[in-house]
Amino acid sequence: MINTHKIIITPEKSVLSFWLELWGYRDLFYFLAWRDFKVRYKQTVLGVVWAVIRPLLTMLILSVIFGHLAKLPSEGGAPYQIMVFSAMLPWYFFASTMQDSSQSLVTNANMITKVYFPRLIIPISTLFVTTVDFLISLVIFFLMMAWLNFVPTLKIAWLPLFFLQAALSSIGMGLWLAALTVSYRDFRHVVPFLLQIGLYVSPVAFSSGIIPEQWRQLYALNPLVGVIDGFRWCLLDETVRLEWYNFDISLASGLLLLISGLWFFQRVERRFADII
Amino acid sequence: MPIVIRAENIGKLYRINHETQGRGFHYKTLREAIVDTGKAIGRGLRMGKQEEIDRSEEDFWALQDISFEIQQGDRVGIIGRNGAGKSTLLKILSRIVPPTTGKVTIEGRVASLLEVGTGFHPELTGRENIFLNGAILGMRKQEIKRKFDEIVAFAEVEKFLDTPVKHYSSGMYVRLAFAVAAHLEPDILFVDEVLAVGDAQFQKKCLGKMEDVSKEGRTILFVSHNMQAIRQLCTRTFVLDKAKIAYSGNCSKAISHYFGADIKLDLMHISAYKHKRAYLKYIEFLDELGKTKQIFLQSDKIQVRIVFVIQEAVKEFSIAMAILHGDGLAVFSEALCDQVKPTSIQEGEYSISFFLNLSYLKLEPYFLAVHLTDMMLGESLDYNNSIPLPEIKNPSADTFIESRRWGVVRLPVKWSEIEAC
């Protein structure tokens, strides 16, 4: 293990600059991410195809049920399928990051009890695989746009920023759940449940415009509302508006999730090896 | 030489929860947490009633009042029975678990090797696992690249570099794993009983590598049951007994302190023996008159009396023993079921003895291993592989000849007279 010279171990804390140490272990980030990536595609028959099938099928089902049967309105001039898919992109990214990172400590329990390294590396390194999946779905999305003759605007340049917002809030959520899963295995069952609810309380199958005006600020407390609205704003046509005030609420709640997640994780990480 | 590790009053407390069946001090479920909080609030409401303290929890000190100083270049051995706190000490020093009390100051780059092959992934190839494992142990990518050929050569796996390690033989797996770890270049190295794996030849190679490492002026803390390795490698040795340092100093003295420690050996292992279906309680070494003794003569017969507790009836019960030489080599083993059919046994406390002719043993440290087994399920109910046998003496033996005698045991050999042919 790499350490810059002096280490003091006490019951409360090992005194060493946290961020400096994380930096010293940057290669481990890379190798863990790369391991997850390799293993994922080595063991599955369909490999990359999974990353394509999942959002595509969900998009089809949601379009048929909500778009055709329930006849929910689309947003702006975009076809319903595109509106759904533009939300499916951040949703799946958020969901799988949250799921993978929340399980990551328990799956790597062996490493945690035998070697010291900043524990934060484990949940954060799960971002790599989910980002690759996201990029694959993004390519599908563009292909579908081309097929439906839908041309996005220049606002698409903002996409990386909204993606970053999704990444930060999903990791915030993941850190909370990962740390809690170590102490309380019940959270293993909580995560799929949260995701199931999340799909319906986030504006994936519908536009957040159908939420009554007076509830929108409250609704924006869900960090995904801002992320999905942002994705739609930059991917769909000119007529789509972004309510910046509500967006800021979502952004703030996402960042709060991240900061509190980091705080909580750091507070309990030293105990992991004792209880995992 | 400057002091590189200073430990002051380290202690580690574990809370064993007896309600959580078979889990010891592991994780809780949310329900348990809520119930516990409820109980705590309940206690708070009835203030002053101290006797209400939940009986299902038991405090257990895995380490207590551990203080020591280690200078740069010291090679310190740590010996002690299972559960004496050796591994806990290394885990605290490696920052894997926090101490409950005390303070440790370490100066220098630290690496710890508590297990061989941590983080190896069966689906990845040998080459990929070298990089992954190296990074987990704290090496930078450049460093691994630089040492890659050396690691591969040491592990002798050149031909299988691009084969997933799940297809490796266990020997190859261990060699590769040790090779990565052996090429770390820390200032301070913590090693836990990793030499207990692999074949004898490879063990020798590993030990040689550790010696090389120590010659470069690095500091090593080495936990082992291999007395030979301790003698060969270490400059000082700690004996840990019941969570405390029982002896610290010269290796040979530490080893004899360890082997001569107790007449009656308490075997109740820390890890929540109360959840086991059966457990070993203690062992006594008796002479032919049935008296406990600390030192035996080579001409004596020894009676080893094992006391164990059955907590849940076992249908096909058996007990097995083995004698291990001080350097870890198993010499022979024998089971009760070799001689009588496995019998059913009810709850209760039992004892069983076996008799051993000490003239078959050399004047060297040996360990005894005892296993309680359920023959029907084929599983071990409780075991201990590191019970030191009492010291064996022979006042009339020539120590020089004894020290040069080959082998790990002595067997009766009948010589004839020398005859002219």
Image (tube, rainbow, N blue to C red):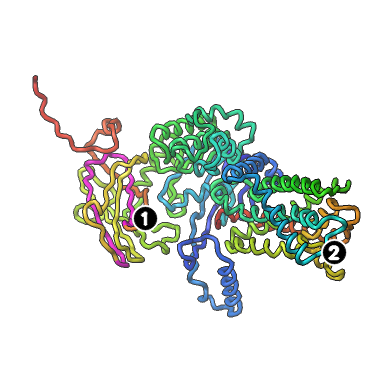
Q: Amino acid at mark 1?
A: Glu
Residue at 83% in and 48% down: A149
Decide if residue B168 is on the left or right side of residue A265: left
Q: Is residue B347 magenta?
A: yes
Q: Which mark is residue A57?
A: none
CB-based contact (under 8 Å), mark 1 and mark 2: no
Residue topped by disc 1: B379
Q: Amino acid at mark 2?
A: Gly
Q: Residues within 10 Å of mark 1 (few under 14, many from 20)?
A: few
Q: Position of residue A150 (x, y in %)?
A: 84, 49
Q: Which residues are magenta?
A: B346-375
Q: CA distance from mark 1 to mark 2?
A: 63 Å
Chain letter for the residue marked with disc 2 in the picture: A
Residue at 27% in and 53% down: B285
Residue at 54% in and 36% down: B125
Q: Which mark is residue A209?
A: 2
Circle 2 SS class: helix
Chain letter for the residue marked with disc 1 in the picture: B
Q: Position of residue B64 (x, y in %)?
A: 50, 55
